[in-house]
């Protein structure tokens, strides 16, 4: 088994034990949710700094995560040699209980009654430069003006 796969199994198990979503763990560890997903699936290998961030967010030490990943690697290699299945303690079968809702953010203070700025146009192609917008275009003369 590869290191990334073993670490991913440990990370997922620890996250489920902590009853956290990938998004919540990513927020606490200051990592993107999709990166947590890639780590858990063994698609990415974490750096030492990332392991430390994850350990802090999970409330354990980086050494705990690494030693558990090593145990998974050694255990699965030994199990493969004996033809045994994945140990029940390492398997993730059931979904964790519902996660606690994150508290709502504090309300922001209301703005004073000052004039609001006009938002910039969404499409830059349709936006005219300020110099062109101020210039008046000459009008064509009406047929009545030609008669005079």
Image: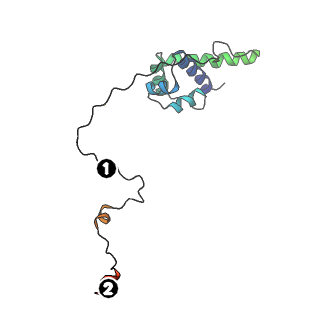
In the picture, the quarter occupied by the N terminus is top right
| Picture coordinates of residue 53, whole percent (x, y) | 45, 24
| Picture coordinates of residue 33, whole percent (x, y) | 51, 30
Coloration mode: rainbow
Residue 112, quarter of picture: top left
Mark 2 vs mark 1: which is more N-terminal?
1
Question: Which type of secondary structure does the marked residue at label 2 adopt?
Answer: helix
| Picture coordinates of residue 97, whole percent (x, y) | 55, 16
Whole-Å distance between the Cαs marked 2 and 1? 42 Å
Of residues 35 and 95, the one drawn nearer to the viewer in this rendering: 95
- Report the residue that reaches farthest toward the bottom: 147
Q: Which mark is residue 69?
A: none
Structural crowding at the residue carrying mark 2, measured as other residues with C-alpha within 10 Å and reported as few (<14), some (14–19) or many (≥20): few
* Above or below: residue 45 compared with residue 66: below
Residue ID at (31%, 87%): 147
In the picture of the structure, the residue carrying the numbered disc 1 is 118
* Above or below: residue 110 compared with residue 100: below
Residue ID at (55%, 21%): 11
Residue ID at (47%, 24%): 24
Instruction: Tell whether 20 sits left or right of 138.
Output: right
Of residues 48 and 108, the one drawn nearer to the viewer in this rendering: 108
Instruction: Tell whether 47 sits left or right of 5.
Output: left
In the picture of the structure, the residue carrying the numbered disc 2 is 146
In the picture, the quarter occupied by the C terminus is bottom left
Structural crowding at the residue carrying mark 1, measured as other residues with C-alpha within 10 Å and reported as few (<14), some (14–19) or many (≥20): few
């Amino acid at each position: 088994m590869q290191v990334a796969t073993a670490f991913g199994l440990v990370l997922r198990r620890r996250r489920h034990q902590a009853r956290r979503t990938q998004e919540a763990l990513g927020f606490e560890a200051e990592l993107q949710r999709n990166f947590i997903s890639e780590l858990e699936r063994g698609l990415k290998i974490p750096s030492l700094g990332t392991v430390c961030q994850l350990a802090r967010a999970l409330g354990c030490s980086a050494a705990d995560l690494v030693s558990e990943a090593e145990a998974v690697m050694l255990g699965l290699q030994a199990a493969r040699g004996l033809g045994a299945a994945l140990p029940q303690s390492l398997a993730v079968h059931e979904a964790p209980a519902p996660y606690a809702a994150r508290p709502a953010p504090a309300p922001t203070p209301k703005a004073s009654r000052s004039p609001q700025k006009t938002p910039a146009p969404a499409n830059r192609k349709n936006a005219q430069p300020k110099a062109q917008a101020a210039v008046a275009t000459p009008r064509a003369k009406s047929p009545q003006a030609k008669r005079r």
